[in-house]
Image (tube, rainbow, N blue to C red):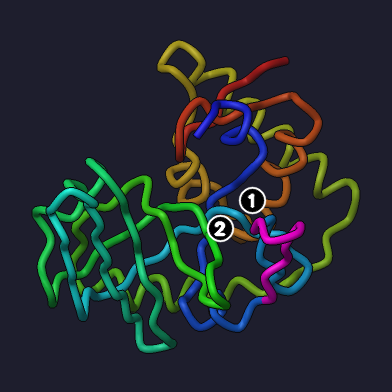
Amino acid sequence: MSEEEFKRHIAYKFRIGDIISGNPVLDADRFKFLEIGDRHVVRVNIIANIVEKFVQDQEKKFASVTLDDASGQIKLKTFGDDIAKFEKFSQGDTVQVIGLLRSWNNEVYIIPEIIKSRTPEYLLLRKLETDLDKPKQISKEQSTAIKTKILEILKKEEDNGGADIEKMITDLPESPQTINLEIKKLLEEGIAYEPRPGKLRYLG
């Protein structure tokens, strides 16, 4: 995946049920994005349990992991040498996944970029996050204030290679959706970019 694509797409936090109820939008046969509410989603950040794992380590390497977070199930799929990403994970593990959405034969799945082990408590945390993360109307003044806070963090963290988006969402008092919305605006305006998943840098 190119740096240009990272600049355009935020990894939205969702429960699996939200993803599988979304509407895939295609350009000819090519997946463009998933419509979830008013969002056009290409990358997601989910926490779930592994309920099934399949690895084919032959000439045509392929691996598939089925995830379940009690709201639904979705598959992670990898090909070629990327199947190594699944090596240390087993059925029953709780994982956090950041990855790209794809759709094939009417099935939406995820190509994982990052997979991390998590404790089961994270499942509840994510549920609370997404249940509380409802659309909220904010004023132009509030939007400007949040944008200013984000830019201050980005400038402060520039010498460290950029700011950690997850930490920013945790540290700022505003809702994750509001912060993600302002980050999306900064990305679209070319004021900031994502050099890699989860990192945000100031372009100015």
Labels 1 and 2 touching (C-beta < 8 A) = yes
Report which residue position mark 1 lands on: 180
Report which residue position mark 2 lands on: 12
Q: At which x and y percent is residue 92? A: 13, 77
| Residue found 52% across the figure and 71% down from its top | 108
Q: At which x and y percent is residue 44? A: 50, 58
| Amino acid type at mark 1 | Asn
Mark 2: which secondary structure? strand
| Residue found 64% across the figure and 34% down from its top | 150
Residue reaching furthest to the right: 140
Q: Nearer the viewer, mark 1 or mark 2?
A: 2
Residue 202 sits in quarter:
top right
Mark 1: which secondary structure? helix
Give whichever of 132, 6 is nearer the camera: 6
| Residue found 36% across the figure and 88% down from its top | 70
Give whichever of 166, 104 is nearer the camera: 104
Q: Quadrant of the C terminus?
A: top right
Name the mark on residue 122: none
Q: Specify the principal SS of the magenta part.
A: strand
Q: At which x and y percent is residue 173? A: 57, 54
* The residue stretch that appears in magenta: 23-31
Q: At which x and y percent is residue 79? A: 31, 50
Q: Looking at the image, is mark 1 or mark 2 earlier in the sequence?
A: 2
Q: Residues within 10 Å of mark 2 (few under 14, many from 20)?
A: some
